[in-house]
């Protein structure tokens, strides 16, 4: 019983923290982007404009929840839910605390990859079910982009698995007690961050929702709460990618003095800052450049890195 | 100038890092935002904003209802009806400007022969209803002379009105009596 109670409290705390952090992140991003562009950003609603997202959320909630007559209603409604469920589900294996994640899954890393792959279905379903040209274009782009970048992401994580000898995210964190893997595996780190950005569909990889070409891409036809779910999914995804990168490359909650969750939050914050910084700096990729970069640069780098890592691991185990 | 077309393969990375660095530094600069209702951007004295109809130094309406402003207006937002008072002075019976269409080009001011219509630096004209943006003569007419303090059209023009005969305008010769020249 107490084990169940503890599990439930952990889930509740994680959910509350995430569902508060994601809208906060919208505000943080708007303020930060503004500073990068010599603007001030939203600063009117509440102290420092912090309640701006509350106002926006209220506005979204009161909008008409519309299913366009030309859309395919069932997948249209299901698609945003898939995104929310997969992103939130993936957090189950992230070890926020020193004692591990909500579920101590032995295939945690695989679970994360699987969840983010299922998340692609949400985008594709949304685009196809919307039955409009812009949504369709966005979905096609999203599918191509996310599938090709997922490979590089998986390969970069595979080299970490080789070193750590485990798919369990908690074990990976424990294995980094001495040295975070970003030092040993800089290439895998860079590949993961780039592929993660692509997975998030954020600038410079925001082709699926390129505002100035295809309106809003796959979620063009969405309104109200369904749109809000996509929005929430994007920002939760930002936290998720940051959290996985923290866990796998920066040693999760490891750190002196402060408790593990605080260290974890600081490191995730760094990644989120990096994502926003990249968005402020980099222009959008062209579609063919995106594909060429993914297949001709990222994938070979990740593959080579995996091969070299594998060879070294084998040499070490054979030597000892 | 020699245009560089070939770059070393690492140029993409160095270029990217440089761009990231520049943007990083920008976040520590002072934002250029002017927080509008509390802070205001300085407005040039000749900024073209809300349009007024001015009066001459004697306090009479300057507009003579010549329709030149209405004709020159590129968006056709001026409408008026000219009429005449008992002294023979022309003035607009009614005058309206539709500010929801006005583009503040200032052509009307340039066209006006009497300096009657003038643009002012006021730009805060927001309304909740479009019909409120149609300004009538009461809204447009001001008490002062605007930019040209001394100018009085009828003191320069040769037309005869009550209290000013032909030949009495500034720099005008007295009228010639053509019968005088008869042999
Ligand atoms: S400023 Fe231009 S657009 Fe406006 S009333 Fe005068 S002529 Fe018309
Ligand atoms: S404002 Fe000037 S241009 Fe327009 S009708 Fe009056 S006198 Fe003529």
Image (cartoon, rainbow, N blue to C red):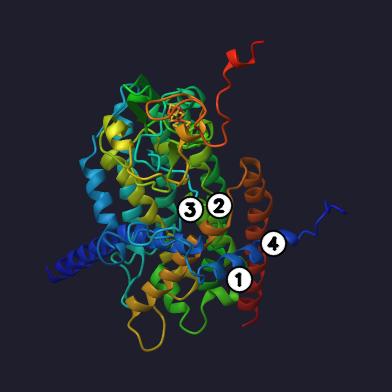
Respond yes or no on whether mark 3 lies under 8 Å from ligand 1: no
Residue A314 screen position, x and y as percent: 63, 72
Circle 4 packing at 10 Å, graded few (<14), some (14-19), many (20+), is few
Residue at the image point whose x is 46% and y is 52% from the top: A200
Determine the chain carrying the residue at label 2: A
Which quarter of the picture shows residue B63? top left
Earlier-in-chain disc, 3 versus 4:
4
- Mark 1 or 3, which is nearer the eye? 3
Can you identify the residue that label 2 sits on? A204
**Viewer-side residue, A19 vs A251:** A19
**Viewer-side residue, A314 vs A179:** A179
Q: Is residue B78 above or below residue B54?
A: above
C-alpha separation, residue under disc 1 versus residue under disc 2: 21 Å
**Viewer-side residue, A171 vs A260:** A260
C-alpha separation, residue under disc 4 versus residue under disc 1: 20 Å
Check the image and name the residue furthest to the front: B183
Can you identify the residue that label 3 sits on? B45
Residue A3 screen position, x and y as percent: 17, 70
Determine the chain carrying the residue at label 1: A
C-alpha separation, residue under disc 4 versus residue under disc 2: 15 Å
Can you identify the residue that label 1 sits on? A186
SS class of the residue under badge 3?
A: loop
Can you identify the residue that label 4 sits on? B15
């Amino acid at each position: 019983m107490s084990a169940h109670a503890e599990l439930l409290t952990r889930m509740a705390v994680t959910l509350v923290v995430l569902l508060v952090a994601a809208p906060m992140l919208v505000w943080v991003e708007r303020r930060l982007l503004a500073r990068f562009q010599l603007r001030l950003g939203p600063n009117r609603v509440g102290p420092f404009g912090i309640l701006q997202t509350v106002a926006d959320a209220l506005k979204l909630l009161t909008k008409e929840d519309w299913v366009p007559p030309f859309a395919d209603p069932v997948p249209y409604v299901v698609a945003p839910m898939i995104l929310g469920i997969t992103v939130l589900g993936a957090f189950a294996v992230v070890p926020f605390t020193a004692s591990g994640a909500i579920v101590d899954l032995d295939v945690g890393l695989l679970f994360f990859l699987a969840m983010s792959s299922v998340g692609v279905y949400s985008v594709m379903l949304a685009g196809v079910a919307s039955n409009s040209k812009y949504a369709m274009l966005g979905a096609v782009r999203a599918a191509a982009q996310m599938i090709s970048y997922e490979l590089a992401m998986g390969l970069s994580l595979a080299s970490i698995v080789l070193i750590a000898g485990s798919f369990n995210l908690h074990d990976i964190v424990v294995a980094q007690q001495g040295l975070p893997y970003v030092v040993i595996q800089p290439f895998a780190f860079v590949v993961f961050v780039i592929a993660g950005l692509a997975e998030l569909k954020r600038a410079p990889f925001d082709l699926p929702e390129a505002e100035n070409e295809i309106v809003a891409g796959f979620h063009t036809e969405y309104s109200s709460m369904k749109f809000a779910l996509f929005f929430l999914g994007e920002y939760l995804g930002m936290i998720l990618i940051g959290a996985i990168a923290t866990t796998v490359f920066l040693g999760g909650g490891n750190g002196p003095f402060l408790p593990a969750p605080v260290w974890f939050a600081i490191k995730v914050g760094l990644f989120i800052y990096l994502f926003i910084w990249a968005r402020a700096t980099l222009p959008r990729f062209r579609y063919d450049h995106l594909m060429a970069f993914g297949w001709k640069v990222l994938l070979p780098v990740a593959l080579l890195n995996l091969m070299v890592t594998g060879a070294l691991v084998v040499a070490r185990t054979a030597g000892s | 100038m020699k245009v560089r077309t070939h770059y070393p393969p690492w140029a993409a990375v160095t270029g990217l890092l440089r761009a990231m660095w520049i943007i990083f530094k920008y976040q520590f600069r002072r934002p250029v935002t002017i927080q509008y209702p509390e802070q205001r951007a300085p407005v040039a004295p000749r900024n073209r904003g809300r349009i007024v109809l001015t009066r001459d130094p004697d306090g009479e309406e300057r507009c003579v209802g010549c329709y030149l402003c209405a004709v020159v207006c590129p968006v056709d937002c001026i409408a008026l009806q000219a009429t005449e008072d008992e002294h023979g002075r022309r003035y607009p019976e009614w005058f309206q400007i539709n500010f929801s269409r006005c583009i503040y080009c200032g052509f009307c001011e340039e066209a006006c022969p009497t300096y009657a219509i003038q643009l002012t630096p006021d730009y805060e004209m927001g309304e909740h209803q479009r019909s409120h943006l149609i300004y009538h003569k009461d809204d447009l007419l001001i008490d002062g002379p605007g930019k040209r303090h001394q100018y009085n059209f009828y003191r320069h023009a040769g037309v005869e009105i009550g209290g000013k005969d032909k030949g009495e305008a500034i720099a005008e010769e007295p009228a010639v009596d053509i019968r005088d020249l008869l042999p």
